[in-house]
Image: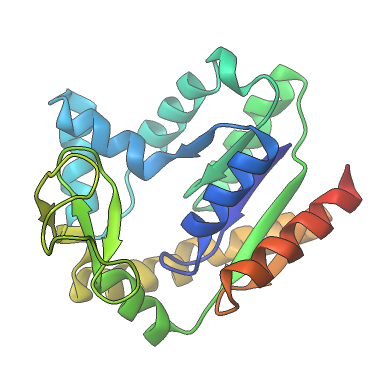
Amino acid sequence: MRIILMGPPGAGKGTAAESLIKHYHIPHISTGNIFRELYKDRTKVGKIAKEYIERGELVPDDITNEIVRHRLSHSDVKKGFLFDGYPRNLEQAEALDKMLNDMGWTLTAAINFSAPDEVIIKRISGRRVCETCGTVYHVTNKKPKVPGVCDHDQGRLIHRNDDMEHTVRRRLKIYLNHTEPVIGYYREKGLLITVDGTQSIEEIDQTLKKVLGEKT
């Protein structure tokens, strides 16, 4: 399985990713998480990425593509992978195609999640993240046992700048302008699967496995 998860931030990609990587035993590649790890380690590219992310803007394509190229060189992706948050525009989609062609690989599917803006804003602005292990909670949907404290390592839960409402609205605008054309790109290739992100987790899980099973 070589899968791309698409859709605006907060449309349900992360939850679906958790299910798919467990079911198919493939690594979850999130460019956002990679960038956060890099700037946590105080790398130069991480510092540059952080400045863009905290403004709700996209990290430049050349930086993102190089990070992805490096990630695809790891041995754990040989049997498949699941991309979350990449590609975000046509240039990145074309760059990914070239990387995969160079490796002799093809995509299984590009899964697009859709949801109304207000639903997305409510989901993302309510996120709280452990500053040490990165576990994600939510003020209404996934509360920790102790308010403000991670269940796993007792780390402090923070409200990230890129999860603030004003940043989320900016991210949605950027998505509309830059990422939606990628949907058409994969539709033309016959790889697009569209999923209603407002469905229950169980409904989405069943839909994805059924459709992906037909493609294997």
Q: In this view, does 135 lie above or below 203?
A: above
| Residue at 64% across, 32% down | 25
| Residue at 23% across, 61% down | 144
Quadrant the C terminus occupies: top right
Lateral position of residue 216 relative to residue 185, left or right: right
The picture quadrant where one finds residue 122 is: bottom left
Q: In the current view of this chain or complex, which residue is farthest to the front?
A: 145
In percent of width and height, residue 79 lies at 70, 23
Quadrant the N terminus occupies: top right
| Residue at 12% across, 64% down | 147
Q: In this view, does 159 lie above or below 20?
A: below
Which one is in front, 54 or 76? 76
Lateral position of residue 163 relative to residue 77, left or right: left
| Residue at 33% across, 52% down | 58
The type of colouring in the image is rainbow
Which one is in front, 118 or 57? 118
In percent of width and height, residue 103 lies at 70, 18
Q: Is residue 81 above or below residue 209?
A: above
In percent of width and height, residue 11 lies at 48, 69
Q: In this view, does 169 lie above or below 77?
A: below
Regarding residue 60, the answer to whether it shows in the image is no
In percent of width and height, residue 90 lies at 57, 51
